[in-house]
Image (cartoon, rainbow, N blue to C red):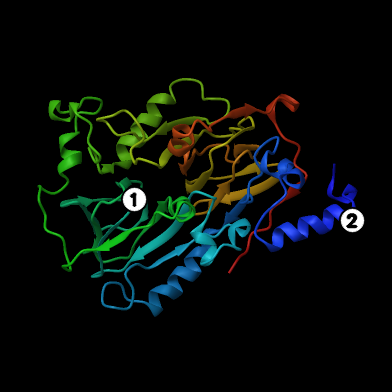
Amino acid sequence: MSNQQWTKELQDFHEELEAVNLGPLWASISAFNSVEPIAKPVPYLWKRELIDDKLDKAKTLLEVGVGSAERRAVFLINPGMKDLKPYGWGGTTQTLYAAVQAVNPGELAPPHRHTSAALRFVMKGRGGYGTVDGERITFEPGDYLITPDWSWHEHINEGEEPVIWMDCLDTPFIMAMNVSFTEFYPERRQPLTVPDDFSSRRYQGGMVRPVSDRQPKNIALGRYRWDLTKKALDGLSEFDPDPVEGYAVEYINPSTGRDADGRLGAWMQKLPPKFHGRAHRHVHTNVYHVYQGRGYTVMNGVRFDWSAGDFFAVPSWTWHEHVNLSDIQDAYLFSTNDIPMMEAFHFERQADYLENDGHQEVVDAFQPIMP
């Protein structure tokens, strides 16, 4: 029975229940038990030019580590999350927070730790490094870095240019679960307890692990180098691409074989020239960063054009397909996801788009905000 069919007496009774903090299941059961997920976030895209413009302004207004700010980061708020306070819970999707962070030469973002899990993808700049639980980890553009939950971490730039990276945390999930804890390190720097780049130097052998890591470690490997990731993708490129994802690899913890960063998953994928993937949808959500290339993604019939430096969000249960517009160049998409959380609760499902040889009809084009 729809709301329009309730009698006047029942409608009055619904209001009577609401006034005393009770509710009528018969009037809301269809919303509570939806036939399929109804995502709060919406498909959306943020242009590099807009983010750069706002981040440049933040660089002039804030200094990091000297009392002005702990971190200089501009995060991506999904329009569907904006009603949540404060600032949409930082929600790029309902579970994932994504941001672009900049550390200028000479700055130190001081150490802290929190219940949110965090990961980084280095976009540009050299001379920066992070310290995670006593290990100094250097990095370069294209590297993937992990900061598992409740790990002490800080960021330092000893180079001559700004260092910029993508952050992804499970902040909206932590906010929804009301389990946010943060602790600030009592000193300006945390002490180093192992040699620099200790974990990545231990794992130079590729798909072999030190025997001491047979027992799982939370941070077996803190840095995943771009040159090795690209080599893995080039190896896959000797074969036919996956019809949906092209060539894709996921970052894993080598001591467990599972996702590198606890509750957060991350992929790097290569779309070869002229690639047009088939559409599918899944319960887990994704936030994509276009590392290299130019193309578009169709989400629920809307075309979202992207180029290097852009970000876009794919909400839960959204039809989507990726296209590389170049005839000669590969496109590289780094993405984060909440697959580990969805699988832990047995929520994950996927479906292939079966009509029109797997391709959606494009009915509209997204118009991004520009500076």
Image location (x, y in percent) of residue 15: 77, 60
Q: Is residue 370 left or right of residue 60?
A: right
Residue at horizontal 16 percent and vertical 39 percent from the top: 201
Q: Quadrant of residue 62?
A: bottom left
Q: Nearer the viewer, mark 1 or mark 2?
A: 2
Which of the marked residues, 1 or 2, is nearer the chain's N terminus? 2
Considering the numbered disc 2 on the image, is that residue within a helix, a strand or a loop? helix
Image location (x, y in percent) of residue 242: 53, 25
Q: Quadrant of residue 231?
A: top left
Residue at horizontal 57 percent and vertical 25 percent from the top: 243
Image location (x, y in percent) of residue 364: 75, 48
Query: Which of 194/84 is in front?
Result: 84
Residue at horizontal 75 percent and vertical 27 percent from the top: 356
Image location (x, y in percent) of residue 343: 47, 32
Identify the amino acid type marked 2. Answer: Lys
Circle 2 sits on which residue?
Answer: 8
Query: Which of 2/311 is in front?
Result: 2
Considering the numbered disc 1 on the image, is that residue within a helix, a strand or a loop? loop
In the rendered view, tell whether residue 124 sits above or below residue 86. Answer: above
* Count of marks placed on residues: 2
